[in-house]
Image (cartoon, helix red, strand yellow):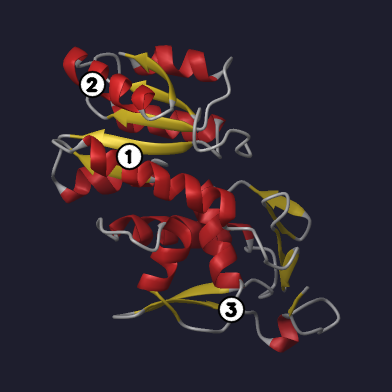
Amino acid sequence: MSPTWGASGVPVVIVEDDTVIGRHLQQALESHGYHTSWFRTGQRALEHLRTCPCEVMLLDLGLPDSDGVDIARQVRAEFPELLIIMLTARTAEIDVIAGLDAGADDYLTKPFTVTVLLARLRAHLRRHTTNDQAQPASTVLGALTLERSSRRVFVDGHELRLRAKEFDLLAALADQPDTAVSREQLMAQVWDENWYGSTKTLDVHIAHLRSVLFAAGANAGGRMPTITTLRGHGYRLDAPPREHADHDGRHPETR
């Protein structure tokens, strides 16, 4: 969904079973202009999302009716553009990675301050509304076509379903094909220039994006770009070789 609300009035779904934490989050967000709906179970939140448009979900991983990771996976499947920020007391890296891999865009480890949460929200919403400005309307790299205005990606005419951050990452890399892009550049462009949290979310999103592109290009005959990891630096989107650029041998182009 494209954001239609300004920085004030953004609808946020809070999924938190702890009454004290839930009430605190709701009051803090409302006082800063957000419109909130608070639910203590994942299923109630899902029912709400299906009838009321929303832009952000704050999702506790420890819920009474189901694991937050499962809820994140279901929400991501139904609402690919929804911004999901996990709230978790689990500090083990495997738990955080599981949540990110299920579709969450970011996470905060409890206890956290409202100031940090508000800063993260502003960063995500700002990037979400500005990433596509002053960029080419579409980019073609072999079998892959990326359309910024509609935020859609196609492989040989078949549309891929990408998460919001995966689209932004692919767009950032496609802006500079065959060029090394540092982790810092990607975090600044896709998340925020003042990002101060862990960057493992970048690695998880890249890994999932790479697997989606690999699967989609299985029948593309070598005409798919590939994401190369540059250890100690970042990533590079390698355009397909010239002879595989298109059916007639044309070189990939950015339009």
Dot label at residue 24: 2
Q: Residue at x 74, y 52 (%)?
A: 158
Percent x, y of residue 105 = 40, 45
Three-letter residue code for mark 3: Gln
Instruction: Please name which of the two marks, 3 or 2, marks the residue nearer to the observer.
Output: 2
Q: Residue furthest right?
A: 248
In terms of secondary structure, where does tag 3 sit?
A: loop
Percent x, y of residue 14 = 36, 23
Q: Which residue is denoted by mark 3 in the rendering?
A: 176
Q: Residue at x 72, y 81 (%)?
A: 244
Q: From where the camera sits, is residue 121 visible?
A: yes
Of the numbered discs 2 and 1, the one sitting upstream in the chain is: 2
Instruction: Please name which of the two marks, 1 or 3, marks the residue nearer to the observer.
Output: 1
Q: Residue at x 79, y 77 (%)?
A: 246
Image: 18 above or below 153 = above
Three-letter residue code for mark 1: Leu
Three-letter residue code for mark 2: His
Q: Is residue 232 left or right of residue 54?
A: left
Q: Which residue is denoted by mark 1 in the rendering?
A: 118
Of the numbered discs 1 and 3, the one sitting upstream in the chain is: 1
Q: Nearer the viewer, residue 60 or 6?
A: 6
Of the numbered discs 3 and 2, the one sitting upstream in the chain is: 2
